[in-house]
Amino acid sequence: MSRRPLPKRLQAEPVSEPDTSLAKVSRRRRLRLRWLLPTVAALVLVAWQADAAGYLCRKMALHAMGDNRPHAALAWLDWAVRSESLRLLPPDDSTPRLQSLAYFRLNLRDSAVAALDEAARRRGDARRLSFYRDLAAAHHGDATAVQRLTEYGGEYLPPQVVFESVIRHGHYHGHFDWAISIADMWIAQLPDDGAALYHRGRMHETSNRFEAAADDYQSALNLQPHLYQAAYRLGMVLKKQRQFDRAEQALRQCLDSPYDSIARIEIADALWERSETEAAWRYVESELDRSPLEYADLYRQVDDFVDDDRAAVTAARILESQNRLTEAIPLWKRALRFNSRNPEAYDALVAVLRRSGRDAEAEPYAARHQELLAMRRECSELRIQISDNPNDIEARVRLAELYAQCESLASAHLVLREVLADAPGHTRARQLQAEVFRQKADADRTLSEPHDRTGSH
């Protein structure tokens, strides 16, 4: 029996072979769409993180500039420049503008002007470029440029920042009278700003005009009683004048402030000078457990660039005056651990060891003391030689090498930076710079480790 065919409406449509080329194209499109959104999101996230990283680096650079550490500021700004390559939008002028200020502080004029040109190029603003050029001229002694800067009315930088930058630059390079004249302009324009009087006082103090400095610091405090930097500097000026009673009163204004620790150390020193050793010991004893690096940072904030472990040195002097020699010896050794380039500390340690009958132990320290004195004499001769012939690169490199051994790593780094600006390919200078960076990192790592008051681990 033959089957009857199904009605057409029930018959299945013939299946056609798929077009494999169209299927492949469709699949590729789906794959691309599937990954497009995550990729775009990842790019946006990376760009946002780059913006955040750049912002953070610039904030750290500003903090370093506030502490008068232009080298550290430039290191942070180098990272900010690297982060800009990941941005989706064109970078603004913030980073090169800050670089220019740091370069000016280091007297690297060509680098500063190049940074200003880059800032103006990014901004495309002729008026801003004019401002930057005036700022460059102001850093190099053009009083009319400073006056022109005040006419911008804080459009690009607040007047206080401009004045302080120019004054610090003059201070850094020893142009104290010029810096005082700029401070006078600041005071005339902003008579209620205690910071202007503070900075003028700093110039007077550095020029050994202590009476004028004390008057300016006191006037700054009269305007702003919580300007603790002025109270601290007033105390230090009065100590230099051997007015220890008044110095103690000034320094007491810093107690329970961010500068409480260093104020206690300096009060102890003033009391020791008055032979009040018991009271002095009570002030300094509690500060011996802190890391010397903490003090170094606080001292920088009050424009006191201390190379020594002031707590250990002050405590050792007090103990020595109380004839507690066995307690003073480890503190002098701790001071040398913080700064192994200080001949005065070596001399003091040798004297205490010999008083204790430990002559054999004193001999290596005595030899190192004589070695440091010889290197410092050579530094003095080299400075005279370089002042007569500033283009003597080899003498400058040798001076940097000696600074790293008998003065400070910061001084060595500054000399090397200027040498490499003049002679970028100088092999020995680059080797020394790497060695200075390594020594600084090793010293910071060692000093930041937990320690007891004698400096032993």
Image: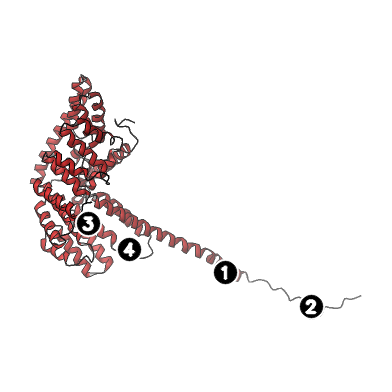
Disc 3 marks which residue?
101
CA gap, disc 3 and disc 2: 87 Å
User: Which class describes the residues within 10 Å of circle 1: few (<14), some (14-19), or many (20+)?
Assistant: few
> Residue 98, how many percent across, how many down?
25, 58
Q: Is residue 91 visible?
A: yes
Q: Identify the image quadrant of the C terminus.
A: top left
Q: Which amino acid does label 4 sit on?
A: Pro
CA gap, disc 4 and disc 3: 18 Å
Disc 4 marks which residue?
91
**Residue at x 14%, y 32% (from the top left corner):** 373
Q: Is residue 309 visible?
A: no
**Residue at x 24%, y 41% (from the top left corner):** 262
Disc 1 marks which residue?
25
User: Which class describes the residues within 10 Å of circle 2: few (<14), some (14-19), or many (20+)?
Assistant: few
Q: Which amino acid does label 1 sit on?
A: Val
In primary-sequence order, the first of circles 2 and 4 is 2
Disc 2 marks which residue?
10
* Residue 187 figure quarter: bottom left
> Residue 206, how many percent across, how many down?
12, 47
In primary-sequence order, the first of circles 1 and 4 is 1
In this rendering, is residue 31 above or below 413? below
Q: Which of marks 2 and 1 is in front?
A: 2
Q: Identify the image quadrant of the N terminus.
A: bottom right
> Residue 4, how many percent across, how many down?
86, 78
Say whether marks 2 and 4 touch (CB < 8 Å): no
Say whether marks 3 and 2 touch (CB < 8 Å): no
> Residue 157, how many percent across, how many down?
23, 62
Indicate the secondary structure of the residue bearing disc 1: helix
**Residue at x 58%, y 69% (from the top left corner):** 26
